[in-house]
Structure formats: C-alpha cells, structure tokens
Amino acid sequence: MLNFLRTLDRRWIFLLMGLAVAVPLLLRFLPPNSATLMDRSVFEAIEDLPDGSRILVSFDFDPGSQGELLPMAMSFARHCGFKRHKVYFMCLWPLGEPFIEDA
C-alpha cells in the first residue's frame, strides 16, 4: 500500500482534492447552522434593552483572529443598530482600530 502511494501520480491527488471541494459547492451543500445557548443569550440581552441604550463594544483582536471574530462583531453591531442603540467602539490593542473602521 505504501509503495502504491509513493508511485501514485500527484495529478490524481490534485483531482481528488478538487472534486472534494467542487462537489459540495456544485450541489450547494450547506451544513446545519444552529444557534448555541450563548448566541441566544446575547441576542436576547440586546432585545431586552430599551431602544436607544448605550452599548460599549471592544474590538480587541488582531488580524490572526479576524476571520472568526470580525463577522461576529459586525453582526453584533448591526443588531444593535437595528434596535437604535448608541454603540461606542473601543480597542485596547493598536491592531484592533482598523476593524472598527470596517464595522
């Protein structure tokens, strides 16, 4: 088996990797998306505030964690905007300031 893998042409591996990516995209496969208890509690906390409340949001993250934290921070800020809250942004890390401008 190990000898087979060593002699296998790498184009077959690239083809299999391409199919592994392309097939779910072409079939529009979407994994199930459900809110966790923490997601629901944050949503309800924003909903329970009276309109026009003041909220402080901290963007203390760097570009390395931007991919997972920026979408959450932007959706949080958008939800606060829908409820007409006054949102104040801050960051203690110098790298977080550009993300505030993006939000």
Image (cartoon, rainbow, N blue to C red):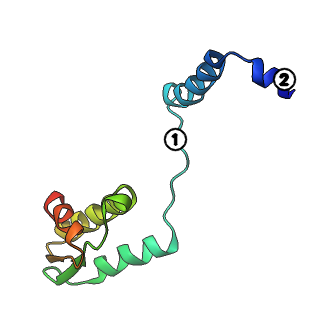
41 horizontally vs 9: left or right:
left
- Can you tell which quarter of the image residue 39 is in? bottom left
Residue 17 left/right relative to 66: right
Element carrying mark 2: helix
Query: What residue is pinned by disc 2?
Result: 3
Say which quarter of the image contains residue 3.
Answer: top right
The vertical placement of 2 against 98, above or below, is above
Q: What x and y, as percent, mark residue 68?
A: 40, 59
**Distance CA(mark 2)–CA(mark 1):** 37 Å
Q: Residue at x 49, y 30 (%)?
A: 25
Q: Are marks 2 and 1 in contact (CB under 8 Å)?
A: no
Q: Residue 42's spot in the image, x, y percent?
A: 38, 76
Amino acid type assigned to the residue bearing label 1 in the image: Leu
Furthest residue to the right? Answer: 1
Mark 1 or mark 2, which is nearer the start of the sequence? 2
Q: Nearer the viewer, mark 2 or mark 1?
A: 2
Residue 76: x and y, percent?
28, 68
Tag 2: Cα neighbours inside 10 Å, few (<14), some, or many (≥20)? Answer: few
Q: Nearer the viewer, residue 92 or 23?
A: 92
Give amino acid for label 2. Asn
Which corner quadrant holds the N terminus? top right
- Where residue 30 is drawn, which disc sits there? 1
Residue 98's place in the image compared with 20, above or below, is below
Q: Residue at x 22, y 63 (%)?
A: 78
Q: What is the quadrant of the C terminus in the image? A: bottom left
For mark 1, give the secondary structure. Answer: loop
Residue 97 shown left or right of residue 47 in the figure: left
- Toward the viewer: 27 or 103? 103
Q: Residues within 10 Å of mark 1 (few under 14, many from 20)?
A: few
36 or 18: which is nearer to us? 18
